[in-house]
Amino acid sequence: MNKTELLEIIRNGENSGIEFKRDDVHPQSLAKEIASLANLEGGYILLGVEDDGTITGLTRSDIEEWVMNICSDDVQPPIIPYFEIVLWEGDRGIGIITIPEDTPDKPYKARQGSRWVTFVRIGSTTREATREEEQRLYQASGVVRYDIKAVPGSSLKDLDMNRLTNYFRNIRRQDCPEQEEPEQWETLLINTEIMVESRGKAIPTVGGILLFGKNPNRYLPQAGVSAVAYRGKEKDYEAIERKTMRGPIVARFAEKEDILDTGLVEKAIEFVCRNTGSKSDLVEGRRIDRPDYPEEAIRESIVNAIAHRDYTISGTDIELSIYGDRLEVISPGRLPNTVTIERMKAGCRVTRNELIKEILRDYHYIEATGLGVPRKIIAGMLEHNGTEPDLIEEEYSFMVRLWREKFEG
């Protein structure tokens, strides 16, 4: 980092990725800041800079060794940052600890006395993580798979046996027990992670309840899609239609792929179809009706939100919003693991909910190549009307925005 870049950082002050510290700070205080940045998106800790941006410079002669020892002894798992010193005025230097963005071993904990504590960064402040935040960090690193956790209080009776029979016999093309054979069903469902054995009992997993539950919201209030269609380009109380969609994710199909009972995916798609129209174009003297949005792009946006949302965030549905000029699908939770928007555009296959993804793939809701975003959403919209979708990651959500038509000028 050169002096110009460093000066700009100091001028802008502390934020979610920048922390100022004196180099006589207690080692465990520095460890706390290192761990919190590693648990977010990385960043910089500037040693020799006061909270108000005043440059006091480094005082330690062994500064690099001191920093590396803290990262090794007071952060768990140990982290190896990049460290450099930029000389300021005279012999005053500023130490720069660079925490990489793609730290894979979350959550990082800092030694605090005799305890190891997980810290998170909120704006320019650092605080101890809540249980839910720590759980999301474990999930983000792939250490914990939330979709195969047991759902306390639930049992085989909470699963839709018609859908399960349909899944094994019609979708997977394999034999399965008769519905009057609960013990055989429990064995099959444990082996396929739709249930899990806990203290001698078979209990449905989160993924099992979401995919095949009779009433998923009884146990998982966040399981659903809240949809609104607005007349204009902004949110308005006078909506065309508002609907909260509930139920299992997957549909029940007949032998010839006719839908006998819709699932959450179909309900959301039907809402879009009801509340969007089409435009007529003359092509070589013939009138061609073109829908506002291509069906594949709609379907992929909805399925991705359902498959990859963060189900540890409770009380928050997937949001489906239709405006006069665009369609937005907002999925709770940041992108999983080390996925970035650029990696997503290239077809990155990392997932958050492996069980849900694999079963949706069995139904062909998701294509096997993992290229749905670049092929169906991005290329599909460009071919349809020449617009490029917006993929936007925010602090607690991810949005796909499709544009109804191309804006000229």
Image (spheres, rainbow, N blue to C red):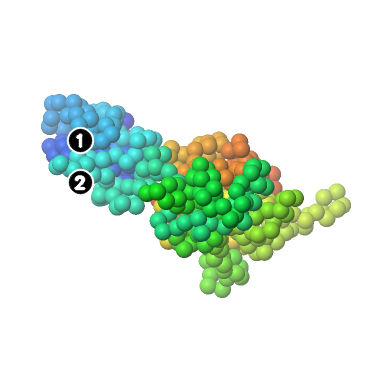
Quick check: 107 above or below 58? below
Q: Quick one: SS at disc 2? A: loop
Position in image of residue 74 (x %, y %): 20, 35
The quarter in which the N terminus is drawn is top left
Indicate which disc, 2 or 1, sits on the residue closer to the N terminus.
2
Residue 337 in which image quadrant: top left
Label 1 crowd (10 A; few <14 / some 14-19 / many >=20) = many
Judge by depth and name the residue closer to the eye, 227 or 352.
352
- Residue at 35% x, 48% y: name it: 135
Residue farthest toward the bottom in the current orientation of the protein: 238
According to the picture, the residue beneath numbered tag 1 turns out to be 74
Label 2 crowd (10 A; few <14 / some 14-19 / many >=20) = some
According to the picture, the residue beneath numbered tag 2 turns out to be 51
Q: Is residue 144 visible?
A: yes
Quick check: 92 above or below 205? above
Q: Which mark is residue 389?
A: none
